[in-house]
Image (cartoon, rainbow, N blue to C red):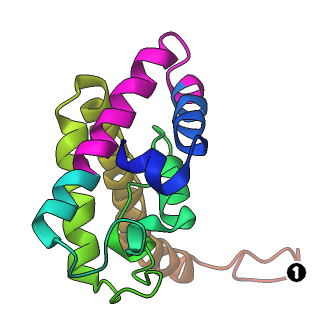
Amino acid sequence: MPILETLFGVAAPHAIKAIAKRVFPKNGDERAQQIHEALERAYKRFFEQCDTQYGPAGESFLAQRDIFDRIMQSISYTAAPLTAANLNGEGYGAASAPLDVRAAFVALLHEEMRKVDVLDRLLLEQKRNIDTAGQRRLRRALLEPLLLHMMSRRPKRCHNAECSHA
């Protein structure tokens, strides 16, 4: 049985299909299958690499519904990319997964997503959105003090007709 269905039951394929149809309206069913397969491969590879160090599939941090929901929310052109910091490392009775372990899972997931052209483009668009936002913040940080300085040096205008410095 696929890992996602083992962990989340029939809710997993339905959630994936709903996200795929929203993000890729023209061919949502095909994209849902591709997303599902990428997730399955990432989960499988993670458990192969970590064995049961952070618990078996049903007890690890990846068994949390919140983790699955965060992954689903990250599958959008306008969403921020999934990061390890977004994932809770607590499992169900299993050892907590530290940040580097969660980062390894995110890297595996992104690696699997990059194998599918349309999902690779989605990740690239998310990165571009972050880069653009970062450039805006940088420009604002650099220009704002300059503008404030220029504004403070401007001669003041007096609206009083009798004033001599107008």
Residue drawn at x 38%, y 35% is: 36
Question: What residue is rendered at 35% in x and 65% in y?
Answer: 57
Q: Quadrant of the C terminus?
A: bottom right
Which is nearer the eye, 113 or 51? 51
Q: How many marks do you count on the picture? A: 1
Residue 49 placement: quadrant: bottom left
Where residue 148 sits: x, y (%)? Answer: 52, 78
Query: As drawn, is 157 to the left or to the right of 85?
Result: right
Q: Residue furthest front?
A: 1
Residue at 48%, 64% (x, y): give it.
Answer: 67
Outermost residue on the top side: it is 26
Q: Position of residue 127 (x, y in %)?
A: 30, 48
Q: Image check: 108 left or right of 89?
A: left
Mark 1 surroundings within 10 Å by alpha-carbon count, few (fewer than 14), some (14 through 19), many (20 or more): few
Q: Is residue 80 above or below residue 62?
A: above
Residue 10: x and y in percent read 58, 40
Counting from the top left corner in percent of width and height, residue 37 is at: 31, 34
- For the record, the magenta segment spans 21-42
Q: Report whether 9 appears left or right of 105.
A: right
44 within the magenta span: no
Q: Main secondary structure of the magenta part?
A: helix
Q: Is residue 33 left or right of residue 29?
A: left
Classify mark 1: helix, strand or loop: loop
In this view, the residue in front, 63 or 159, is 63
Q: Is residue 12 above or below residue 63?
A: above
Instruction: Please state which amino acid type lies under the numbered disc 1.
Output: Glu
Residue on which the image places disc 1: 162
Q: Looking at the rendering, in which quadrant would you find the N terminus? A: top left
Q: Is residue 22 above or below residue 136?
A: above
